[in-house]
């Protein structure tokens, strides 16, 4: 089990996906399970790089504790984003979960070869997504020890998901 400092910490997830419906599904899935995280969204690889390097409108956003990364996006695809992340000493320790609809085993192998922490198929139903997000957050934010992320960033972003409402059930991030 992670130490109490990690349990009391607020966690940030950056979802990099060109599909707004997928982002909203993840956001609603987290809320439905009462999981309190700061969820941010980048629509493509270029916006993700601006977010991660705190450029322009993203100057004051936090460095995420976890990244959910789609593979198939216009412009810079998920593999390019992953390579850029893993090439940067300040970002390479952030766990990256590839969350995609691709079932191609070559994509799975390639993702792991270039540094993905895990590879998940996008669930087909809301309940499956909610359960997947609960398991993902339990694993990354309650079970394992994450490296400390750089501090000093304000908690502000242009497209931050609404905060999860108080609800009974799983709340490991309190």
Image: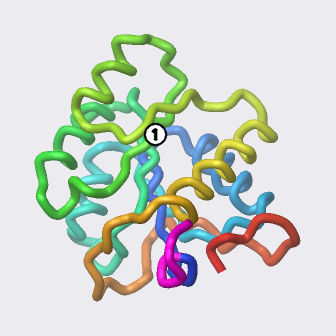
Quarter of the image for residue 146 reads bottom left
Q: Which residue is mark 1?
A: 18
- The answer to if 138 sits in the magenta stretch is no
50 shown above or below 148: above
Neighbor class of circle 1 (other Cα within 10 Å; few <14, some 14-19, many 20+) is some
Q: Is residue 109 left or right of residue 43?
A: left
Query: In the image, residue 65 lies at what x, y percent?
Result: 40, 64
Residue at 41%, 12% (x, y): give it. Answer: 105
Residue closest to the eye, 32 or 6: 6
Answer whether residue 75 is visible to the viewer in this image: no
The spot of residue 15 in percent (x, y) is: 47, 51
Asked whether the viewer can see residue 91, the reply is yes
Q: Tell me the element at label 1.
A: loop
Q: Residue at x 27, y 61 (%)?
A: 52
Residue 5, above or below 82 = below
What count of labels does the image hold? 1
Percent of width and height locating residue 122 = 60, 31
Q: Quadrant of the N terminus?
A: bottom right
For the record, the magenta segment spans 1-6
**Horizontal relation, residue 147 to residue 8: left or right:** left
């Amino acid at each position: 089990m992670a130490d109490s400092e990690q349990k009391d910490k607020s966690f940030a997830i950056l979802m990099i996906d060109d599909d707004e419906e997928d982002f909203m599904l993840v956001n609603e899935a987290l809320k439905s399970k009462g999981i309190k995280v700061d969820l941010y969204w980048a629509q493509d690889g270029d916006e993700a790089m601006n977010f991660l390097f705190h450029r322009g409108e993203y100057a004051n956003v936090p460095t995420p504790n976890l990244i959910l990364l789609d593979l198939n996006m216009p412009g810079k695809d998920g593999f390019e984003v992953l390579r850029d992340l893993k090439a940067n000493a300040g970002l390479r320790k952030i766990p990256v979960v590839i969350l995609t609809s691709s079932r191609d085993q070559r994509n799975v192998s390639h993702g792991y070869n270039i540094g993905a922490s895990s590879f998940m198929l996008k669930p087909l139903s809301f309940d499956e997504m909610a359960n997947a997000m609960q398991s993902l957050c339990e694993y990354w934010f309650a079970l394992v020890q994450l490296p400390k992320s750089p501090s000093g960033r304000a908690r502000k972003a242009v497209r931050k998901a609404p905060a999860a409402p108080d609800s009974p059930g799983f709340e490991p991030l309190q």
